[in-house]
Amino acid sequence: MGTALLLGCVSQPAASHSSDDRRVLVFSRTAGFRHDSIPEGVAAIRDLGTSNGFTVDATEDANAFTSRNLRRYDAVVFLSTTGDVLDPAGQRAFEGYIRHGGGYVGIHAAADTEYDWAFYGGLAGAYFQSHPAIQPATVVTEDRAHPSTSGLPPTWNRTDEWYNYRSNPRERVHVLASLDESSYTGGTMNGDHPIAWCQDYQGGRAFYTGFGHTKESYTDPAFRGHLLGGIRYAIGDAQADCRPENGYRPLFDGTAASLEGWKQAGPGSFTLSDDGTLTSSGGMGMLWYAGQSFRSYSVKLDWRLAGDDNSGVFVGFPPSDDPWSAVDHGYEIQVDATDVPEKTTGSVYGFRSADLKKRDRALNPPGEWNTYEIRVEGERLRVWLNGVKINDFTNTDPARSLRDGHVGIQNHGADDQVSFRDIRIRELPAKGD
């Protein structure tokens, strides 16, 4: 048996290539300022492709933007492009490519591009406005599960040219990282300064990072990992929840202080590591949030299996120091790589299987992070995995009720090691069945 908390998002790339035949086009044409780091950027992306199984072509020829040619690629990288770089025919071809599931990666000055092309502005997420001098700043990692940021620390000190944007994209995109404007001078976004984000956009996948002005960026292992994760998401090799996320508050934010209010029921435990990850050991027990019960809510969390491990998230159970009370009176959303349909990842354990085709397309394998969203409204329980709805269940058991209960994560047994990050909740208006 197992338990965990939930989130997610998925679309198929336009080219629909197999995972060992991915192809990426790097486009670095400039009609304005030209960054001297472009050659280093092209070389870095070529290296990443060689090491990670995708082919990289590079061009500054706008004539590459035809429907026929773009179909060859799983993603197009706009590498510090500036100004008007595509004619109307190229724009139409690229719009069609995205709408048929293509991937977009924007790096740094990709936001200083095509100001009069509304489709592109929406795809990039925001337009460049200004920047102060190159200087160190503190980057806050907001999403710890996305492949572009899962390897970064909660805060990251780096030197770059920090763009201010003409609008704050937070309501429209899923913010992955932001800047602490108190850590440097020249930020103009009133303390809410997204710097990297992703989104599902009109049928395609989009990832943008404001990093990458300097030549040194492209030899920095942390930045290269960030860039690789963004490309893997864009080409469909990694899944992530890229829906906008606003209004949540943390129940566990990776700090020891945020574990106040949580209680261990039964044997075993969870260990908190320096990077803010909780990992299960022993069991069968449960770490549950005793600080408050919830009635109508969306709870999200990130989870990772080490291998064929077992855990889960419990919801809708009464307070108890006996983990079996949650089994008997609540519901478990399973986390388990292999089991029968009603007892595997995404299932309401023992009651309802996930949609396995959708689940399999949305699921990242052991060793990679996944995000769950579990939404409880009345007696209805819905589950999203990496942005994709995979389960919709309504309680009819009079011995159980989802209308008021606690949430918890399971430590299943001695051989099961499952990790969790960033448990957060948004309370919703009460609804009936």
Image (cartoon, rainbow, N blue to C red):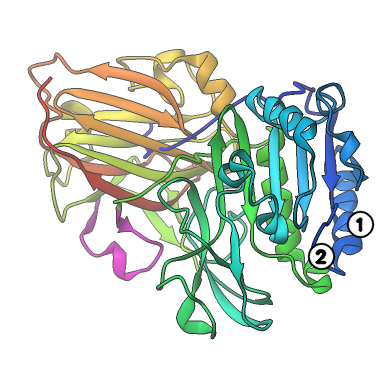
Q: Residue at x 76, y 65 (%)?
A: 221
The span from disc 2 to disc 1 (Cα, nearest Å) is: 8 Å
From what the image shows, is residue 224 above or below residue 35? above
Mark 2 is on which residue type? Answer: Tyr
Between residues 21 and 65, which one lies in front from this camera angle?
Answer: 65
Between residues 387 and 309, which one lies in front from this camera angle?
Answer: 387
Secondary structure type for disc 1: helix
Q: Which residue is mark 2?
A: 218
Q: Which residues are magenta?
A: 249-265
Instruction: Residue 257 in the image: state x and y as whole percent.
Output: 30, 70
**Quadrant in which residue 137 is drawn:** bottom right
Q: Which residue is mark 1?
A: 43
Instruction: Residue 364 in the image: state x and y as whole percent.
Output: 59, 34
Q: Residue at x 62, y 36 (%)?
A: 205
Between residues 379 and 191, which one lies in front from this camera angle?
Answer: 191
Kindly tell me whether residue 365 is visible in this rendering: no
Residue 117 lies left or right of residue 240; in this view the side is right
Q: Is residue 253 magenta?
A: yes
Does the residue at mark 2 contact the one at mark 1 (Cβ under 8 Å)?
Answer: yes
Secondary structure type for disc 2: helix
Q: How many marks?
A: 2
Residue 40 lies left or right of residue 124; in this view the side is right
**Quadrant in which residue 218 is drawn:** bottom right
Q: Is residue 267 magenta?
A: no
Residue 193 lies left or right of residue 4; in this view the side is right
Q: Residue at x 81, y 73 (%)?
A: 216
Instruction: Residue 413 in the image: state x and y as whole percent.
Output: 42, 40
Instruction: Residue 259 in the image: state x and y as whole percent.
Output: 29, 62
Mark 1 is on which residue type? Answer: Ala
Q: Which corner quadrant holds the N terminus?
A: top left
